[in-house]
Image: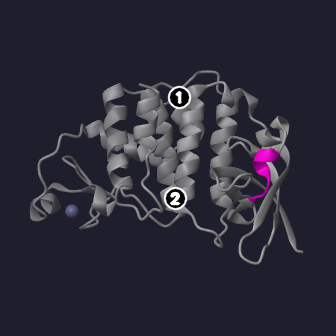
Amino acid sequence: MAYIRDRGFVLKHEALREHDTWISIYDERHGKLVGIARGHRRLTGKQIGHMEPLVLAEVMIAEGKQVDKIAVSRVVEPYHGIRKDLSKVVILSSCLSLVDMLTRPGVPDQRIFAHIEELFQLFSGLTDSPSKERAQLFYSWFALRLLSLSGNIASFTDCVICRRELTEPIYPIPKMGGGVCARCAKAEGLESHDTLPMTWKLLRLIQGASCEDIASVSAQKALFRQANAVISDMLEFVPADGEPHGFRTISGVLA
Ligand SMILES: [Zn+2]
């Protein structure tokens, strides 16, 4: 039987039958893999720890006739510090769930693996627990880059209709992935809006930022909320395998 060996982040696992688990993983070289972890729930506590979503694990995949079988051989990086911080756990879980919804098997992209790893590495060294607004900002940053890696480009600098450089007032148009100028907004019959001018500056900053920048960017909470709302509205129109729930989950858990 042919085996694949790789390292990856567990995106999702669901109990299937008595002892089996349906598992979805994003691997460094093979991209997304989905399959069955046989007898997984019969494993000892220590081994079950290997299957937890918030670790980087070395996995072995055996290609089956109908479905691939996945086994975790060892934990490469347990990210112990992350697990104790509810804020980090909920952000990472939301981001991994989004990767699961926006990717499919057979199209590996090492940049997506590196994107996930960047967030894990920053969080393992971050001493502060992110506030609710910053937690959502991390999710916005993660979602924006993931969208761009999967071919959904968001535009906060040029009008998504006439392509001219955007100047205030700017109108959000989530279904087209960005903002439009006042002239196009009028032609499209868009309702007046209430985004603060600085919101668009913040959106551009998020788009070009590293994960580390997001940890230190400072602005009023209202501005964070508006930028997050623009991204949240955009995500509703992205073709995804499921409904991206990160913003709701984060605000529910970190209320
Ligand atoms: Zn325009």
Residue closest to the eye, 210 or 232:
232
- Count neighbours of disc 2 (C-alpha within 10 A) and say few if under 14, some if 14 to 19, many if 20 or more: some
Q: Name the residue under label 2.
A: 101
Magenta stretch, residue numbers: 37-42
* 26 vs 195: above or below: below
Residue position for label 1: 216
- Residue 129 lies, in percent from the top left, at 57, 23
* Amino acid at the residue labelled 1: Ser
Q: Does 38 appear in magenta?
A: yes
Q: Quarter of the picture for ligand 1?
A: bottom left
Instruction: Please report the residue visible at 40 percent of the width from the left and 47 percent of the height from the top.
Output: 204
Q: Where is residue 248 in the image (x, y as percent from the top left)?
A: 40, 39
Locate residue 124: give its quadrant.
top right
**Picture residue at 64% right of the left edge, 21% below the top:** 127
Res. 183 visible in picture: yes
Secondary structure state at the residue bearing disc 1 = helix
- Give left or right: position of 21 versus 194: right
Residue at 72% in and 61% down: 36
How far across and down, in percent of the image, does residue 123 sit?
A: 64, 33
Tag 1: Cα neighbours inside 10 Å, few (<14), some, or many (≥20)?
few
Q: Which amino acid does label 2 sit on?
A: Met
Q: Residue at horizontal 32%, vertical 50%? A: 233
C-alpha span from label 2 to label 1: 28 Å
Q: Tell which residue pokes out farthest to the top in this image.
A: 128
Residue 186 within the segment the image draws in magenta: no
Front-lying residue, 155 or 103: 103
Q: Which of marks 2 and 1 is nearer the N terminus?
A: 2
Q: How is the image coloured?
A: one colour
